[in-house]
Each structure stands twice: as structure tokens, then as C-alpha cells.
Image (cartoon, grey):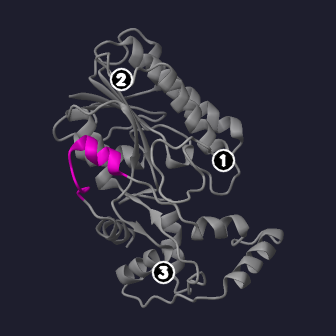
Amino acid sequence: MKILITGVHGFVGSNLVKALSKQHTIYGLDIISPAKEGVRYTFSWDYLDKEDGIPEVDAIIHLAGKAHDTKNQSAAEVYFKVNTDLTKKIFDYFLVHDNIKKFVFFSTAKAAADKVEGVLTEDVVPAPVGPYGESKIAAEKYILSNTDLTDKTNKRVYIFRPCMIHGPGNKGNLNLLYGVVKKGMPWPLGAFENCRTFTSIENVCFAVNGVLTKDVPSGIYNMGDDEALSTNELIEEICRSLGKKAHIWKLPKGLMTGIAKVGGMLHLPLDSERLRKLTEDYVSSNAKIKKALGVEKMPVDAREGLRVTLESFR
């Protein structure tokens, strides 16, 4: 196939190029356009408006977007300008080009729910909190309002809602947590038992290749590993990769909650919001995408994927 990937130079884009370029021809669309192994050519966004600007392709994978700013320093309009407006632009391009048969949009689990009670499935009524999730759900709504998901047309549209994606080259929260543990600092939140779904980049690449090459129905699909892990288990895996003994302190929850409140007033690293993010449950079901791909398990289990990621941090 000939595939156009937006945001091709990002973390997910770079890994998809490695996974897909062996069998497919890859073109990029990005704000920067250096030469990249596996990419025939990277175009700038203004090429979408040029006649014969971009070669004919069979599919588009839309990754370009404004990532979640954990420091909450980005203005809301920036999220909507990038996550919503760019999605409209590239999706309109897909709609008017009959030769492009498949469109894959990377949304986020946070577009569906900021908090999860039980297990998150695709039929949840979306309730995002904050401009990141809100801008992504606005993009989803635009796609859905212009798409027939019953597959009566010859075009297929896939909306992926991944939980936190990790892998070699990842520079997100997992990398920050790794740095803290590497310094030998004890983990003081051991009393909080939680379960979280993570997404190994290998499983992302497997799913994307699956929807591109198989007869998969259009629709919204959660993306995540088969197993959910607790933060304590994550700390243990990090320590194991470092050859260190895990120091997990089970300090009273009330004490840590109080410390977080004071931290918020004094603008310290641990505040109430960060405490919630570190200790909350967030479990997402990947049953729908596995059924669509005809598999019982994703190719990489959660712990194996984490080990690969953590080894790359070393």
C-alpha cells in the first residue's frame, strides 16, 4: 500500500514507519521535513491545498496533534487549533479523494473519560475534562458527522482511543517516573492499590497494520495491552530493569492526601491532582479491536512491552 502518515517524525509515527515501511510505501506530512529512513518524502501541510501536491495514496494515518501538557501551561485554543482543526483539514482531504480508502485517526482514551469506574468500553458516553480531551472529542465528532460507519461506502474510517503509549523513544510520564526511581528515591504511595491500562507501541503497530490490511469494520476502537498493571507493579518493573530493590512505602493514605493538599498550596511537585493521576484506576477494554482483528491476545503482553521500553531508557 501507499500510506500517508501525519506527524511522521513523532514517537508513534517513527515507530509506525519502522513497522510498515518494510512492506508499504510511506509518505509523511509534518511541520518539519528532514529525510527519514523508510519515508519516501515528507510534505508540509500546505501541500494539501496544491493540485497534484501529494502523490496518490491508499490510506492516511493521522497522528499529528498537540499532546497533553501535564503542566497545564498550554492555552486551550492551541489544542483546538491543532487537534481539531488539523483533523478537519486532513479528513476533508480524505473525503474528496476517491482513491484513499482508509483513514486512521489517533484520538485518546481521555476523549472518552477523564476518570474510569470499572472498565472503559467504546460505547461510553464521552465526558472529557480539559482542552486536550475536549479537542480530541471535537475532532471525533467531526469525523463521525461526515462518516457512514455502517461501511455502505467503499471507505473505512477508524478512530483509535489509546491509553498511554510507550516504547523506545518515548519521552512521556513513564520516562519521568523512571528518572525518579533511578535516583533511589522510595515510592511513598504504596498504600494506594490501583490498576491502569498501558499500550505497548508494538501492539499499536500491530493494530494499525491489521486495520489497513484486513477487512475490519469502520468504528471507534480502544487501544491497550491485555493486562492492566498497578503503579506499584510499574515501580517494581522499573527497579528490576535497573537491578535495584524496590523501596515501596505504604504510608497512610490520609497522610499522603494531606501532604498533597499542602503541596498544591506551595506549588510543590506532589499536589492533589497529581496524586489522583498517580493512584487512580484507569482500565480500558481492548476486546473490540481484538475481535475485529481476529485474535485472542495482543502480540506483546504488558510486562514484556514495559521491559522493552525500560531497557531503552538505559
Which segment did they paint magenta? Answer: 286-299
Mark toward the viewer: 3 or 1? 1
Q: Residue at x 21, y 50 (%)?
A: 295
Residue 246 left/right relative to 55 = right
Q: Amino acid at mark 1?
A: Val
Of residues 238 and 256, which is closer to you in this image? 256
Q: Which residue is mark 3?
A: 182
Q: Residue at x 27, y 45 (%)?
A: 291
Q: Amino acid at mark 3?
A: Lys
Q: Which residue is mark 2?
A: 150
Of residues 251 and 17, which is closer to you in this image? 251
For the image, the number of numbered tags is 3
- Which mark is on residue 197? none
Question: Can residue 15 be seen here?
Answer: no
Of residues 63 and 312, which is closer to you in this image? 63
**Disc on the earlier residue, 2 or 3:** 2
Residue 265, percent across and down? Answer: 83, 70
Mark toward the viewer: 2 or 1? 2
